[in-house]
Image (cartoon, coloured by chain):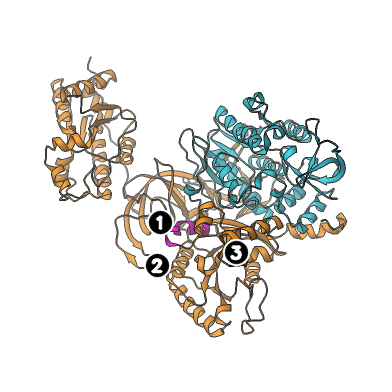
Amino acid sequence: MPLTHLHSLEAESIHIMREVAAECENPVMLYSVGKDSAVMLHLAMKAFYPSRPPFPLLHVDTTWKFREMIEFRDRMAAELGLELIVHINAEGIEQGIGPFSHGSAIHTDVMKTQGLKQALDQFGFDAAFGGARRDEEKSRSKERIFSFRSKNHRWDPKSQRPEMWSLYNCRIHKGESIRVFPLSNWTELDIWQYIHAEDIAIVPLYLAKERPVVERDGSLIMVDDERMPLEPGEVPQMKKVRFRTLGCYPLTGAVESDAETLPEIINEMLLSRTSERQGRVIDRDGASSMEKKKQEGYF
Amino acid sequence: MADNASAADIVPVFQEQAEKTMLRFITCGSVDDGKSSLIGRLLYDSKLIFEDQLESLVDDSKKVGTQGEDIDFALLVDGLAAEREQGITIDVAYRFFTTEKRKFIVADTPGHEQYTRNMATGASTAELAVILIDARKGVLTQTRRHSYIVSLLQVPNIVLAINKMDLVDYDQAVFDRISAEYREFARSIGIDDVTCVPISALYGDNVMAPSENTPWYQGPSLLQQLESVEVATEDLARPFRFPVQWVNRPNLDFRGFSGTVASGVIAVGDEIVTLPSARTSRIARIVTQDGDLPRAEAGQAVTLVLEDEIDISRGDVIATPQARPEVTDQFMAHLLWMSDQPMLPSRPYLLKTGNSTVSATVTALKHKVNVNTMAQEAGRTLVSNEVGVCNLSLDAPVAFDPFVTCQPMGSFVLIDRLTNGTVAMGMIDHGLRRADNIHWQAQAIDKVARSQLKQQNPAVLWFTGLSGSGKSTIANLIEQRLFARGKHTVILDGDNVRHGLNRDLGFTDTDRVENIRRIGETSKLMAEAGLITSVSFISPFRAERQMVRGLLEDGEFIEIFVDASLELCASRDPKGLYKKAQAGEIKNFTGFDSPYEAPEAAEITLDSATTTAEQAADQIMGYLEANEYLSDT
């Protein structure tokens, strides 16, 4: 009896994680608190059982994440007994960078991309797990599972190493690093099915609930704290919404939904006609914008 | 938006969804065969193109599409900016779609010959290959090339999709003729079972469902074939293999071996053998976080606990004792070269197989295989995208099975030691017995004893630099000074050695590497004898100097870079060689039409422009004194 697709995907991800643990000197797991990170963390617990995962978690906090994400993050790390490194770009804070004052592009670059590079340099991590999937976006569909970064964290799509069978070449020069994507071959649907099948804890924001939102450029933005500047006469509306992806709350659009349980989410997914990154404000500028961002060091 | 179905209605659907199997397949064919269109069609018809993606696809089709007013599905899969600009697929793209029966992972691979390596990358994980043919053109050179690569990588299922049937009026005669021609060719390269399907990717004929336009065709549609083909059953019937990936030791009471079952089935209580150490034990537990398992099978990632305490480390293989893998340090293999730097026999590469990494050299290139005609051709080296049959020699034995009987146990990659790049993929054919018959002879008097008698420490002074930089002059001076101090020395001079030991070698890159390998081995023997050896060789390649360093013990290899510009050497021209090279009478002359790679961290660097030979000798003697090579009190 062949393995089911979820079992095959699980085994592949576990193999990838063990390979990094065996070959890299100082790995770290990027933990963004979203559903993909939840699955990745769950797989890491399985991969090394009964040992603990032999690496810490790293969260690059832009200070604009949903409050529920931060609570969830701290609870998970404590429950699992894992080391959690939280890095905030101090220079960005000093300069008062934020999505409302500086726009999404600058905010994301300074607080997320630069913040990530700072953290990787500061701790000297030579491999970093990320939860990206190939079905998310075109340039990701061509990225290897083991994706190499120069000393300056740049990705060169033209000189990717061939990746044969499950033989991963983990060798790098000093100062270079590898971004490793154990969920490369998972789709959004696989993620939800696996979360359901394995009963994995996720941030409640993924499930529909009445939440205060305002409409901005066609996106429903949740008013998560008092930093959200309201236009004159603008009043947050209570709407039943959920999130398909989670990031900085001012940059993450909600969808109206009645799906309060995982099976209902999966049902919505099967009927859905828009891709999940549609909710992300930063992806909308030009076909190769993600490729460019990734070359500059974005995860 | 959401259908307001209740959770109870959804669960059974969800269960079905979760119990699918998975099929990884590859599509091959050139841009013109409609490969990307086919994938676009599969994604579109299985409703995996989302509205926002379709919107940007319609935009892009108008901007750069090749289908006029129609949507250009190819743009959906050509993801990198360079590909969209050039309108070709360069790198492997992975796409996903799901039907009621299966989840599919499609590796969309490029068709051009210069991207054969990318196609092989996609094929390495595929369980099925869809080979596309343009019905108007029939079996072409590239069809043969793709089929050969697919057979080389042992992709178990082949579907021949004869596309653009709409352009030949859905003519059965065309389909029958091409099918017959292909089947005959396929048999000649060892592919016995082919399913041929007439399709039109553009209009969807026989892609998802059987088409009314081909009433004469009774076989499955492409998707029906993809959904019904049996996968991964062969691996279960094969002997149990488990390459140890990670030793799991959370505390002193638990010692497990984590890895993925490569083939076969294992159950608690089964007898096993570990390789290469050949110790036997039994399976005590099969551990997972979800609880212990009674058995595990190919593809599962588990942690094994044995009944006995046996020393096992990463790279060892746990196997069934009834059918053991071979253990060898020499084997014959097919190599597909992937690097822009050509393969050099004798150059040491890193070989990664299963979970072990060892040093390996190609000792013989038996023949090359022309990927277009499958003809065997003679050759001394392999360049990018070439296939060759080679003998390889490893510096430590590994456990393996031939690639045709167990893919995870018979596959390997070669890694360049300096760039860390993956330069080749390899498929093991069989082991070579030679290694069993040559044993190391134990010696009563060793290197330490020999050098103590001479009151010195053995060293290899490796002079590298352009012809005419002054290597031999300085080496001679050093030997005279050491001799005067009562030290035991010898000189290996590039020109002199080429008159004897290496007189069969020329000046191609391949021969230069072999030249240095022999000198390296000779230097090692001299060091064993306790001598201080001066070697003056141009030795232009970093990798070979590194190789010699690796042959010797730490501290024995002293790299001395005699740094002189090409202009300076050419003006000295002690042997008149530069004049000849300039006149084109000598080929492959270092500095002219053959590269010189300067050392990055030589122990000693001598600036030939500002230093006399005497001063250079002072500098080297100072180094030897300071580092206690001349240990006379």
Q: Residue B524 location, x and y as percent?
A: 26, 36
Quadrant of residue B499 in the image?
A: top left
Residue named by callout 1: B335
| SS under mark 2 | loop
Q: Residue B252 location, x and y as percent?
A: 62, 31
Which kind of residue does numbered mark 3 sit on? Answer: Asp
| Image mark 2: chain | B
In the displayed structure image, the side of residue B149 where residue B609 appears, left or right: left
| SS under mark 1 | strand
Q: Earlier in the sequence, mark 1 or mark 2?
A: 1
Q: Is residue B268 visible?
A: no
Quadrant of residue B63 in the image?
A: bottom right
Question: How would you rate the neighbour count of disc 3 (Cα within 10 Å): few for under 14, some for 14-19, many for 20 or more?
Answer: many
Q: Which mark is residue B372?
A: 2
State how far apart marks 1 and 3 are (Cα).
37 Å
Q: Main secondary structure of the magenta part?
A: helix
Which kind of residue does numbered mark 2 sit on? Answer: Asn
Residue named by callout 3: B72
State how far apart marks 3 and 2 are (Cα).
30 Å
Quadrant of the drawing holding the C terminus of chain B: top left
Looking at the image, is B408 positioned above or below residue B480? below
Looking at the image, is A172 positioned above or below residue B191? above
Q: List the single residue furthest toward the top.
A: B633
Colour assigned to chain A in the rendering is cyan
In the displayed structure image, the side of residue A260 where residue B302 appears, left or right: left
| Image mark 1: chain | B
Instruction: Report if the CB atoms under discs 1 and 3 are less than 8 Å apart.
Output: no
Colour assigned to chain B in the rendering is orange
Out of B377 and B172, give the one closest to the viewer. B172
